Image: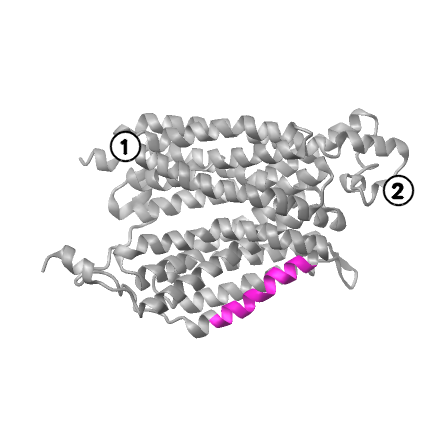
Amino acid sequence: MTTATQADEIKGYGTSRYRSYVLAALTLIYILNFVDRGLLAVVGPDLVPELGISDTQFGLLTGFGFALLYTIVGIPLARYADTGNRVWLMSVCIALWSIMTVLCGLATEVTIGSFTIGAFWILLACRVGVGIGEAGCTPPANSLIADYYAPQDRSQALGVYAMGVTLGTMFANLIGGWVTDAFDWRTAFFVVGLPGVLIAAVFKLTVKEPPRGYTDPPGTQSKERVTLGEAIRELTTKPAFWYMTAGATVAAFCGYGISSFQSIFLVRAHGITAGEAAIWINAPVSLSSAVGTFATGWLATQLYKKHPGAIAWVPGIGLALSIPFYIFAFTTENLVFAALGLIIAGFVKYGYIAAQYTIGQGVVTMRVRAMATAVLLFVANLIGYGFGPLFIGAISDVFFINGITEVGVAADELTRNQCHPRAIAELSDNLQAVCGNVYSQSLQSAMVIMASLYAASSLFFLITWRRLDKDMVDRNPS
């Protein structure tokens, strides 16, 4: 019997119906993962003024506060997923991030004796907890899918699971936006967080831990684990990998920064509610981005057959094209035009996601591919996710302070949150006029600067294109 025939006969673990249930459960969990992760950006327009935090602090909450331990803890959790009980690991992590999400809704100033802990620090600790919990989701989930589904069915199963990213982002806006407007931002955290505790329990009780390597062909030997040092030594000979990583990191830096502050910008610039921004603008933008991710990835894959460099220059062009649409969206006074600009920008820019994995795995030998992907994600998440929102928040605060000092108002005389519509009536006419000039414009300038940085990402992918012929292993097997 041939190896190909043996592979075709390999069946996944359990019955077809049970495998479908497990895949549906894993996809639901992944959706919940992104709902809980993205909710803070949705409720930000109401949360920021109520807690009295600055844009810099909000950037820390949405970015570095979440990404640091999410990135670092993800490595040992992924290692554990290679040997330990994956169902137990996921169940504990789901419960952890869900409980921490609920606690985000309880964040308030706490006084212990003579010591006071501000609401910002409470919320930051909760976000760190969410990040730790969510780090234990994707590595074991991918491992479970690999054992539940045979190789010939695995790609389709992983495609279904990957839908959790865009669906989670959409539901964060649809559910979080509606609940915030109907009740308040704290209730939104309760509504999306509490079901996760129940889901964790049901998942543990109904999903079986499959034998490790169940769908591997008979006689398959376990692969020798490659050390980080070995992977880095090979990667140092592949400039295309590092140019691509730089491009993907800058794209993540800009993307996470913009998405974290998009709701706040729309509320400040156009006077709409957090729910209206989430439901009528952010949700369609997420849908457009999902379609664009598939379309540009498909286009690059088709062109790759005859033009290998397309896997780099298609996303490079898409990232460059997004810049004028983002700048238009952030500068127009018409809300409909702003929405259209964001929708088009989101559609054309996401080709780099498929490209980063294709290039990352294509320039190295087979035994280093997993580690190369881990290095890519570590850099992109830590720098892009961690510092993108923090950067845009800090720039926004700098522009605000510069704006009020230029008209003779001291930095300690007026804060941004005093310019919020709920509080501005308490200010003098002069300070109200100052607010009108700098309240939204400061964040607008930061958003435009961030969108312009996509040019650097585009350039890195175009430079990657020039190196692919030399670095791609499948075209240079020697």
**Visible residue check, residue 234:** no
Give the labeled residue for mark 1: 471
Identify the residue at horizontal 38%, vertical 26% (top origin): 463
Q: Nearer the viewer, residue 162 or 288?
A: 288
Identify the residue at horizontal 71%, vertical 35% (top origin): 269
Instruction: Indicate whether residue 192 is drawn in magenta.
Output: yes
Identify the residue at horizontal 28%, vertical 64% (top origin): 12
The secondary structure making up most of the magenta span is helix
Number of the label disc, if any, that sits on residue 426: 2
Number of the label disc, if any, that sits on residue 422: none
Looking at this rendering, what residue extends furthest in the left direction?
Answer: 1
Query: Residue 340 in the image: x percent, y percent?
Result: 58, 34
For the N terminus, the image quarter is bottom left
**Visible residue check, residue 369:** yes
Instruction: Indicate whether residue 401 is drawn in magenta.
Output: no
Mark 2: amino acid: Glu
Q: Quadrant of residue 393?
A: top right
Q: Which residues are magenta?
A: 187-202
Identify the residue at horizontal 36%, vertical 35% (top origin): 299
Left or right: residue 16 versus residue 255 is left
Q: Are marks 2 and 1 in contact (CB under 8 Å)?
A: no
Looking at this rendering, what residue extends furthest in the front direction?
Answer: 336
